[in-house]
Structures are given as C-alpha cells and as structure tokens.
Amino acid sequence: MASRRVEERREGFQRYKRDVKERGKPFFPYAMFHDTVMSLVVVAVIIALTCIWKYTAGGDGTEPGWLGPLYAEKADPATTNFVPRPDWYFYFLFYLLRIFKWPESVILGTVGIPTIALMLLLALPFIDLRRERRLLRRPVAIVASILVVLSMGVLTYKGATARESLGSAVLAAVPSWAKKQGFEGNRQAVAGAEIFAQVGCISCHSYINTGGGFAGAPDLTDIGSKQGKTAKYFADYVKNPSAFGNNQMPRYDRLGDENLRRLGLFLAASKGLK
Amino acid sequence: MEPRNGDKPHLPPPSLWPVGFAIGIACTLVGLVVSFPIGFGIGVAITVVFGFLWVRDVTRDYATPPPAPEHHPEPAAEPAPAIPASHGEAALPEPTPEELSTMPRSKFLEGATLGLGAVIGGAVTLPAAGLMILPAFVGQEQDEVDVGPLGNFAEGEWTIVTFLIDPEIGEVSRRTAYVRYNGLLEGKPSFTAVSNRCVHLGCPVQPSGLVQDEKQKKEKGAKGEEIRVIPVEGLSAFGCPCHGGAYDTEGNRTAGPPVRALDRYTFSIRNGRLHLGKTYSVSEVESQGAQALIKRYRLAGPGQHVDGIEKVLYPIQPPGR
Amino acid sequence: MARARSARREQIEKLALYPIDWLEERSGLVGGLKYFLLRKVPRDTNWFHTLGSATLTAFLVQAVTGVFLAMFYKPDPDKAYESIQHITNDVTLGWLVRGMHRWGASVFIILMFFHMARVFLFGAYKYPRELNWIIGVLLLALGMFEGFTGYLLPWDNTAYWATVVGININGTAPFLGPFIAQILTGGAEIGSETISRFYALHMLALPGAMFALIGLHLYLVIRLGVSSPPWSAEAAGAERAEPEPTGRAGLVSPGPRGAVGRPDA
C-alpha cells in the first residue's frame, strides 16, 4: 500500500511518459544533431589545445609556451629546489591543504572535507526529497550551487597563484629582476641577487612584488638610488646592521666577505624599475 | 533450394565408411611426407578399400529397388493396464514426507552449486588480491647506506647529501638528507641527519641558506653508486614549498601544517666513513646540536601524528621499515 | 517504365537491406539500435542536454588516444620519461596523440563538472533518476582517480611529487591510512612497483569500471528518459490544469499551453 506521496510521483512519471510519447520528437535526428555538434566542438577544442601547446613550447620542449612546457625535468626524488604542484583540477584541494595550517587540523583538509563533500553528493537524492524542479523555488539549491562554484573557483585560483618565499622560487625570479633593474650585464650583481634570493632576506624585505613578510623591513627595489649609497656601504650594513643603528635585522657576517661584496653590488645596482 | 512438390531428396543411409576414407586420405598425405613408400602405400590402400565400401553403400538403393515393406499385423495382445510406479506389487516405495524434508536433492544441488562457485571465485580472486596487497608489506627493511668520508663534514656546517637509500633498485631510490657534524659528544662524533621529506605530506623540504653547488663533491658508495655532498652556507631554517611548513635547524616545526618534527636518520661510523641507518620519527627536539634531546618514535608516514591526542588515529604502522 | 524503375529500386533496396535483416533476425540488435535512435525525447530538450554526450566523447577520445599511447609507453622509472620523449619527438604525430590525451583529461573533468551542475540545476536527480545520479557521482570519483593515476606516468618532477603528496594524503586517513598508502605505493617507498601499479589501475581497472558504469548510466537514461528543462512552458510531465489561486499568485507562470505546477520528471 504505497503512500500518497509515492503514488503522486509515480503518477507524475507516467504523465511524463505520456507527454513524451504524444508530443516528443525522435532522438535522431533532432537531439542527436545537437549532440554531434557539441561533440565536434569538444574534439576541436582538444585538438586546438594540443596544437597551441605543442607549437608555443620552445627549446627542446622544456621551455614553457602559452600552455606550459612539453615536459618538466625527469623525476628527481632527491631534489632540494623543486616546487611541487598538482594538476590544475586538484588546485582547490591543494589550496585547502594550505588553509589548514594548524597541525591538529591537517586531517580535516586531507580526508575530512573531501570525504564529507563526496558523501553529500552521493546522498543528495535522499536529502532533497521535494519534487520541485524549478530553480526559483529551490532556494537551498541555488545558494548551495553558487557557494560551491564560488568557493571552488576561488580555491582553484588561489591554488594556481600560490607562491613561496623559498629560495628556489625566488631564485627563479632573478633573471627577470636583472632585466627590470638593468643589471643583467653585471655578473657580480647577478651573483649578489642570487645570494639575496636564497639566504632569507626576502622573508622580511620585499623586492619587486616578492616577499616582504615583516612590516618594519623596507622595500629594497630602489635602495640603490637612495642618497648615493655605495656597494661597500651595503656590504658593511648587511655584515653588521647594529653598527648602523638597526637592532631588528640579524647579522649576516657568516656569508663571508666575498658574498657580502656581491650583495652590496646588487643592492647598489637596484635603482628602481626602468 | 526447396524441393518441388512430391520430390523427396535422396538421403544416403547412415554409414561409417567415410570415416575410414578420411583416415585413409590423411595417411596418404602424411605418408607422402614422412614415410614414402610404405606409409603412402598403406594410406592409399585404406583409402581405396573404404572408398569402395562407401560407394557401394551409397549406390545400394540404386542397384535394386528396396523390397516393399511387408505388412506384419500387430499381434492383438491385451495391453496391460497402466498403473503408476508406486502402486501394485513391484511398486517402488514412495518417500515419506519426513524423508522428503531432510536434504531433498534440489536443495543439495543448489547449495553445492553456490558453494563450489564461491570456492572457484575465491580460488581465482584471493591469490590475485593477495598478490596486489601482500608484497607491499614484505621485505621493506632499510639497510645502512654509506654516504662518504668524514672529511666532507666540517664541524658546525650543514651539507646536503644525496644517496641511494636502496642501491639495488637504482636511481629511483635517491634520497636527500641534511647532515651537520656537531663535534664530539663524550669522545664520539655526533651528527644531525635530517630527512628532507616534509612530515606534512612528503614534499621535498628546502634549505634556507646559500647552496654552494660549485663546491659539490662526488663520492662512490659501496656498490659504485654516486653520492653527492653539497655544502650549504648560512643555513638558518628549512621550508617546505608545498603548503608553507617551516622548521628550525633541529627539525622542529616552527610554522605551518607539519604535524611533528622532521624525521631523522640513525648514523654510524665505519672505516672513517659516515653511514646513515634507519629512519625514525621525531615529535620534537629540545636543546641543540650534540646536546639535542630527541623524542624518538617508530617511523610514521607524513601527516600522521606520533604524540598528542591524534596519535590514536594511527595505532598500527605497517610492518617493515 | 516507372513501374519497372520502382520495381528495380525495390530490388536494390531489398539487396541493401538484406545484411541488416540478416543481423536483426539472428540477434535483435538492429531493433535495439533503432529504438535508441528513434525513441522520443521531450520537445524542449536544448543545448544543455548535450553536455552528457560531450563528456562521453571526451572519455572516448581518452580511451582511443590511450590505446595508442600504451603501444609506446614503458612503465618503468628508468624508461618512462624517455618513452614519452620518444612519443613526442620521434613518433609520427605522437605529439598530437599525447597532447590530445593530456588536454582531453582536463576537458573530460571540466565537462563532468558542467554536466553534474546541469543535472543538479535542472533537478534531474530527483525521482525516478536517483540511481543515475549516484552512478554519475561514482563516475566523477573514478574520473578524478583516473587523472591522479595517469598523472604519475610521465615520471617527471611534477608527476613524482604530486603522487608523493597524493599517496600521503590517503595515508592520513585514520586507522587504515598507513596501509592504504603502502598498498598504493606498492612498498614503503615509491619505486617501479608504484608506476606499474598505477599503470595497471589507469589502463585496466579504472577504465573497465568506468565503461561498465557508463553503460549502466546510458541504459538508465534511455529507460527513464531525459527530463525537460524546469523553466520550460511545455515541460513534459507538467500538470496541465487551469491556474488555481494557490496563494502563490504571481509566481505561477501559465505558459501558452497552460502548463502549471511542477514539471514532473
């Protein structure tokens, strides 16, 4: 003895079948034509992406084009300067892991939230028992879908643009710094820039849109154009900042005089963006 | 293809002579290759004999008309009255209802079919599943690895050492350790050997310092594999490029999601060379250098807590390692 | 003359149809195909409904390009990278097949999400299509797992480290986590067992499961029918009554055919 609700929805389905039988159109060719066109678009997009990827990648395939390189370097299980990233469609999960910074909460980000999301998806037809299908009468559905789309979009974007202040990531930016500041030809200054990128300066100071984790540390993009400070001045400063009245910044005398000299040359050459 | 009205196709009577004929042909051909002329001759003989018999059989009807079937009237015997097998004198005893209820045949067959099916299914699936699962847990011990002469490690200086953790399987087992010589502790050399796999989710941890690639040294290990030793100038911390984890020079977590301190290697010194042994997990390290007090646990995977409340989530570690 | 021509034409038609009739009599498949092609769908199916077959097309692209790649790829840590280089550089149009497989994966995942969103927004997961939705979610999970296992195969740095993290994420599951991680890895450390394992999953187990579920998914679509867009005025299954004052005046939109109330199914 089925309940009234079950009866009603069975009736509704019968009504649907009758309507389709009486007034429906045959799948072939009406709907199938649309399907075929769409499938053609899909295949064309895949081929177009492939061609763009292949023909814009430079060198022997390791230089990225518009869509990335043809291959990265071979797997090195012992690397100390690679920045791992997943495939783009996992960026939202990747960024979720960066959000959960507290060690006790790690398991939430790794298994908790994805599992809950999957369970919700699977259980959806049993959670939403209403027969209503018109969107304007389904406020929970609208809100949920907007929230999901927005949050996944934001998480994916943030995952894609996540940057590190670590040595290797900053080191990769040195050539572009050299170009922007105009000291590419000066090998000593470039060497100084590489030292600057690796010993942790960038975790406090900012330099051309990178780093700057400590509010009190000044931006060093155009430090070399200030009041005619020489390379030697900078080398001495970094060696022992407290001698110049700076008690916040740690000493870097352990780098050795040669490296300090190069650092000084780099800072002096940083006269601001052209 | 259908016969016209009244025409009946001629059907030869059943006969076995064609079999002999075929065998004869086969013998002839084989004999032609293998055993000429004896086998060949025998084959020809068989073929001819059986062929003749076959043809005689087939043409028998054409030779003489078949005799008209004689009409033998049936002897008009009185037909015996039909009685079911269970009645009468020679009746079979009928099973009683009680007997029928215990193990009737159909139930037995049902059960046997399903049972045997389960056995077959198990016999096929279990070894395959076992093959997939068990080898992952067998033979996973980590042996000692030679990472080069003690002379490469200056006191108080960090070096990046890359070595093969299992030289048998080659380059895919290359690993990195950050090694610092701490000087002597009670007359014995003390080393800090920290693994570069982040204990959040296993990404390669990077040193915050000046990596001096130009001063790299290459050593040869026990099986001829390459070991690289690279000094790092001014190493002040470790950082993980994936999710923002940060560690200090003892491997303690200073920021980010790592759930404990960096794993470490045990070490030993043989013949003036440093050897790295088993990896173990560390919850935290107090003090520094040679005086460090290391809270040591059995090796756990990344992301798995070894102390605190959440360690109950990981009560058993897989065997090996 | 006309009669002779039409008689000749009839003969030719009969000749052409002979193989089809032969097949139909012995298998019944032709009838099935005719039913699939000529079955009725609601009048108002629109372009949104093409996302499902677009996803299927992307999956088939993956399957076909995958077969060709499997003829050249070597699942061993020492050879995998070089075999991919060989495919890209030396094999004729190898770059095209490899690129289609790689970008097809992204397109497949995007289309799955779009298709899922369309079904959700149309409310087409409701009675009687709940089972189809569950199968679809399982397909989504399997598809993402396909992407994960396939990502390791080129054996470059991005592949290796993404897999390390992915396996360790599984390892953080409570109680069984460490064992799951070790089973996926094929040992304690990632090595040649891992790449073989992932290859077998990526090429055999997961596609097999996906083909089976897709078959079931399509069967249910054919059996249960495609639902009309919910906003449609002539939605199939909508109750057709005169608009009654239900207290929700103004929200009910009687379309040209007087379709009122829920567009059911």
Image (tube, grey):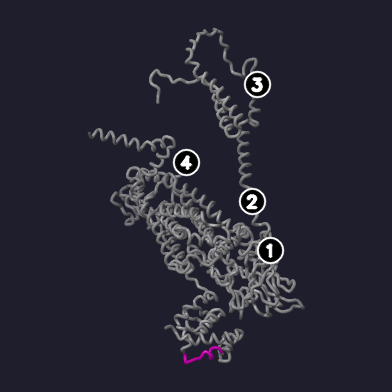
Q: Chain of mark 3?
A: B
- In the image, what residue type sits under mark 2? Gly
Dividing the picture into quarters, in which one does residue B102 lie? top right
Q: Chain of mark 2?
A: B
Q: Which quadrant does the N terminus of chain B fall into?
A: top left
Rendered location of residue B280, percent (x, y):
68, 67
Q: How many numbered discs?
A: 4
- In the image, what residue type sits under mark 1? Gln
Report whether mark 4 lies on the same chain as mark 2.
no
Rendered location of residue A227, percent (x, y):
47, 92
Dot 4 and dot 2 residues touching (CB under 8 Å): no
Residue identified by numbered label 4:
A1
Residue identified by numbered label 3:
B93
Which range of residues does the magenta coloring cover?
A226-235
User: From the viewer's perspective, is the residue at label 1 or at label 2 nearer?
Assistant: 1
User: From the viewer's perspective, is the residue at label 3 or at label 4 nearer?
Assistant: 3
Q: Chain of mark 4?
A: A
Q: Is residue A228 magenta?
A: yes
Q: Which quadrant does the C terminus of chain B fall into?
A: bottom right
- Give the CA distance from mark 1 to mark 4: 66 Å
Dot 3 and dot 1 residues touching (CB under 8 Å): no
Mark 1, Cα crowd under 10 Å, few <14 / some 14-19 / many 20+, is: some
- Give the CA distance from mark 3 to mark 1: 75 Å
C264 vs A87, nearest the viewer: A87
Does residue B299 sit above or below B235 in this rendering? above
Q: In the image, is B44 to the left or to the right of A270?
A: right
Residue identified by numbered label 2:
B130
User: From the viewer's perspective, is the residue at label 2 or at label 3 nearer?
Assistant: 2
Residue identified by numbered label 1:
B142
Element assignment for label 2: helix
Rendered location of residue A3, percent (x, y):
46, 44
- Give the CA distance from mark 4 to mark 2: 48 Å
